[in-house]
Image: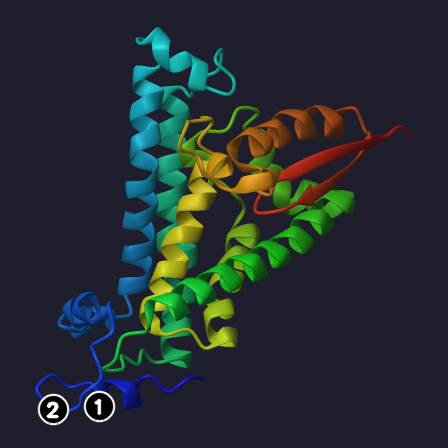
Amino acid sequence: MRNWTGQSLAVLSGWPGALPLPLLQAPWDWLRAREPWLRSPFFPTVFNFLTYMAFCSPFLALDLLHPRLPALKKYKIQPQASPSAAALLACLTRSLYDHLVCIFPATVAHWYWRPVSLPDGAPELPRLLLDVVVGLLLFDFCNFLWHLLHHRVPWLYKTFHKAHHKHISTFALSTQDSSVWELLWLGLFAAGIPVLLGFHPMTEMAFFMINSWLSVEDHSGYDLPWSTHRLVPFGLYGGAVHHDLHHLKMRLLVYCSKAAVVLSSFENTNYHTAVG
């Protein structure tokens, strides 16, 4: 694991010949001022849930507005579909329950096993960006293998992954509407990758927030002009359009007893059907 404290001792302001402070030092100092809260066993779960809800909120607003504003319908991937109040409430209730009963005990165990360490120095911005990109690629690869396995093996799909596919048309709050088994595995990937790669705590928070945003955006049900898949060149990122199609097509394929192969790239899904 990298040592992030030595740099900070060399860049203390006011020292003759001191190196310039990292660009991220000021926001990192602001975070470190909240150290008791960051070290709390409650912080990961609360941060997870509040971040998730904050990222879902804009798309929930679109879900409420698009039936009343025809101009928004062109951005809805399935314009005829809109989540009902009952579906939204059910997803929200399950998310609260899962955070309390599933995610909180897991994060407390992680907190006990790996006590929070907050170095004085902030990471350099290029290093943070590189680490986040590498972390996202590794998370996507782990998720791809898990996803492929749970679509290839009928028992795994029916027992653990089918719960996430009950939504034919995705919406933001359906992102974490999954079985406990699936949530724990995705949480293991998200928590284990920063440990494996030796992330600075600030990098770890940035990785988690960007990863959470991409997951919510993929399930949002909207193809907006600024969506990530439109910003990444050469069609390398599938985004919400492909993932929404995956939820629509996979349900039909599975119920027709056909084989489906899921190939993912950043939550992107392509489909090949084999008639048995």
Label 2 sits on a secondary structure element that is: loop
Residue lying farthest to the right in this orientation = 276
Q: Amino acid at mark 2?
A: Trp
Crowding near the residue tagged with mark 1, few <14, some 14–19, many ≥20 C-alpha atoms within 10 Å? few
| Quadrant into which the C terminus falls | top right
Closer-to-camera residue (70/274): 70
Quarter assignment of residue 255: top right
Q: Image check: 180 left or right of 125?
A: right
| C-alpha separation, residue under disc 2 versus residue under disc 1 | 10 Å
Quarter assignment of residue 167: top right
| Quadrant into which the N terminus falls | bottom left
Which residue is located at x 53 percent, y 56 percent? Answer: 186
Residue 243, image x, y percentages = 58, 34
Residue 49, image x, y percentages = 32, 50
- 35 over 176 or under it: above or below: below
Label 1 sits on a secondary structure element that is: helix
Which scheme is used to colour this image of the protein? rainbow
Closer-to-camera residue (236/239): 236
Q: Amino acid at mark 1?
A: Leu
Q: Image check: 221 left or right of 10?
A: right
Q: Which residue is mark 2?
A: 15
Q: Which residue is mark 1?
A: 9
First of labels 2, 1 by sequence position: 1
Residue 23, image x, y percentages = 24, 68
